Image: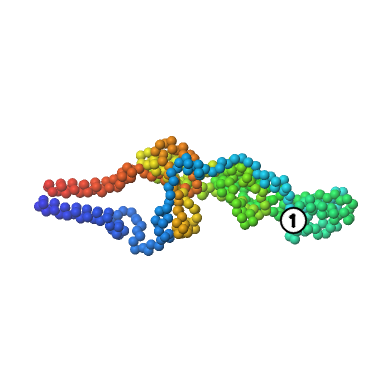
Amino acid sequence: MKFRVYLTFKLIIMKLVKIFALSLLTPAFLSGCTIIPGSNLTTSNKEYVPTLENQSNYLSNIKIYPITPSLLEKMQLAPIQAQNNPKLEKQLQNYQYRVEPGDILSVTVWDHPELTIPAGSYRSANESGNWVRADGNIFYPYIGLLHVAGKTLTQIRVMIATRLAAYIEHPQVDVNISAFRSQKIYMTGAVKNPGQQPITNVPLTLLGAINQAGGLKPNADWNDVTITYNGHQQTVSLYALMERGDLMDNRLLQSGDIIHIPTDVHQKVFVLGEVKDPKVLKIGHAGLTLTGALSSVGGLNQLSADATGVFVIRSAQRMHHFGVLKSEYVKNKHPIATIYQLNIKDATALVLGTEFQLQPYDIVYVTAAPIALWNRVLNNLMPSISGLNDLTSMSYNIRNL
């Protein structure tokens, strides 16, 4: 009787072990069996349409560069220094506002109040001024129509005085602008007061426009400010301009210019792997170094991290179309990324990390030590081994009944 029970139970154990082995070795079993907890995604019975030619084509030629003093010297950018902008200074010295349709002129003829305020002394300068019509003309007594569009105030003053000389002896004429309505620039993005700003007889620069807009918001991206003018686009760094005093990035604005201050949503790096607190970090307008990123996540996990495997994965070209990398890079065998490796087995190597500047969308990845990987394999196997050991012990106990 004991032998029959033992034989029956032994057969049950063998079937369980066979099922367990099949579950580990047969992918088809993994996709179809219902005893596995949770959900999974399988590619069986599905049509696989590769978007790239071959995974090995764009992963095989990726190069890894050790972070060394010589590499940092090659990558180091020229230091930002405070300097003047001679070209801008010359433009400001020679600046003259030119009247365009929509402006309102105020013309004063001394000793002739009937010509100065013909509409009445109780009206404002805007109401009683001379509006520049769409055709660029104004109407003035004795003169009639006078084309003023595109001319400076000095030129308009000479024109009016010359025409009035036929009716008034030695006319003394003064011309001012009561309202600047024809020309404007547009400030958009992460500033406190976005909107239009008029171009006036006081030259407007990029720095002046930002100040008039109330300054930058805390989430502004200082490094990728764009200026769109005449169908062209220029990118400038406000960090160099506003914090380092490099006036070479300042420029004189013209009518129709669009200044966009983006937010820092794209100024981020990803810190992953064997660190204490993996997270997404913002670079900030002053930049972020590799050592700074590691310290922001609490440093390496001293129990599992491989100190020789601190990697920075940098996209070679961030050219995306709806999130898909352009296939031309694969066809032309361009690498999709470049990898930089920092060995901090000796902690003094972190000094090199303080000189390595991270760029947007860099991935900082810290690999696990081989012993940590082996321990993880054992941790996954131990429940199964323990279960088989329990079944074996049970069969031994039944056999001895």
Give the residue drawn at x 59%, y 45%: 238
* Nearest the eye: 193 or 369: 369
- In the picture, residue 31 is in which quadrant? bottom left
Task: Count the marks.
Answer: 1
Residue pictured at 65% horizontal, 44% vertical: 85
Dot 1, crowdedness within 10 Å: few (<14), some or many (≥20)? some
Q: Is residue 64 left or right of residue 241?
A: left
Residue 124 at least partly seen:
no
The residue lying at 77 percent from left, 50 percent from top is 176
Which three-letter amino acid code belongs to the residue tagged 1? Gly
In percent of width and height, residue 108 lies at 82, 50
Compare residues 133 and 242 and report the one nearer the observer. 242
Residue at the extreme top of the image, as rendered: 348
Question: Residue 17 location in percent, x, y?
Answer: 22, 53
In the image, what residue occupies the spot 42% across and 60% down? 53
Q: Say which of 235 and 97 sits in front.
A: 235
Task: Return the x and y of residue 187 as percentages of the image width and height.
Answer: 62, 50
* Residue under label 1: 150
Q: Position of residue 154 (x, y in %)?
A: 79, 50
Which quadrant of the figure has residue 45?
Answer: bottom left
Q: Nearer the viewer, residue 357 or 189?
A: 357
List the single residue furthest toward the front: 70
